[in-house]
Image (cartoon, grey):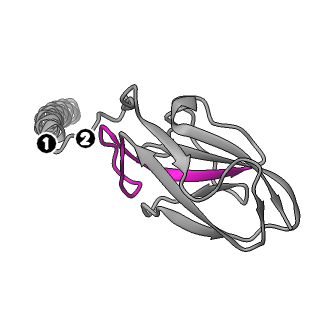
Amino acid sequence: MKKISLMLALSLAAVACQNQASQEESSSQENNSTTSEESNETPANQQPTAPADAKVFFANLSDGDTLESPFLVEFGVEGMEVEPAGEVHEGKGHHHIIINNQYIEFGGTVPSDSVNIHYGGGQTSDSLDLNPGKYTLTMQFADGWHRSYGKQLSKTIKVMVK
């Protein structure tokens, strides 16, 4: 009987702890939603959208350019603000360069490898060192979690590297 009473007491204590943790989590989520609204942070399950007139562009390169490696790439953006990766905020994000591939669909995560270059520090330019040949360069703007803003915030050009 003592074993049953002890097990019952432990079970009740565990339920009480779970209820308290659940209440604290709920309270924490309410506080975080207030903080998120105040900081303009987008909820984790919702990707921000871009204004209809927002766009990205290569500030110093044009389609069809012939370049010598290494060469400078300057990233341009209008209607959005550049910020480092990490948090997700409305109207903000950072650049990526995709070599020899097209834009990433809206909401898709931009991969990180030798041909999908992340500028998560909020960089607005970089030097690329490519072997001679023909290349397609796609600039892709993405949110703080590297989720693409899609075709609207991408720009693709073709260049020749000597």
Task: Judge by depth and name the residue closer to the eye, 144 or 5.
Answer: 144
Do tag 2 and tag 1 residues touch (Cβ < 8 Å)?
A: yes
Image location (x, y in percent) of residue 41: 25, 41
- Which numbered disc, 2 or 1, marks the residue that appears first in the sequence? 1
Give the magenta-colored segment's residue range: 80-99
Magenta-colored stretch includes residue 102: no
SS under mark 1: helix
The alpha-carbon separation of the residues under discs 2 and 1 comes to 8 Å
Image location (x, y in percent) of residue 106: 53, 29
Q: Which residue is mark 1?
A: 35
Give the answer, above or below, for where 18 lies relative to 143.
above
Left or right of 153, for residue 71: right
Task: Judge by depth and name the residue closer to the eye, 94 or 77.
Answer: 77
Question: Furthest-top residue in view?
Answer: 52
Give the answer, above or below, for where 129 lies relative to 113.
below
Quadrant where the N terminus is found in the figure: top left
Left or right of 101, for residue 139: left
Image location (x, y in percent) of residue 67: 77, 65
Q: Which residue is mark 2?
A: 41
Which amino acid lies under the numbered mark 2 shown in the image of this protein? Glu
Left or right of 111, for residue 21: left
Mark number, residue 109:
none
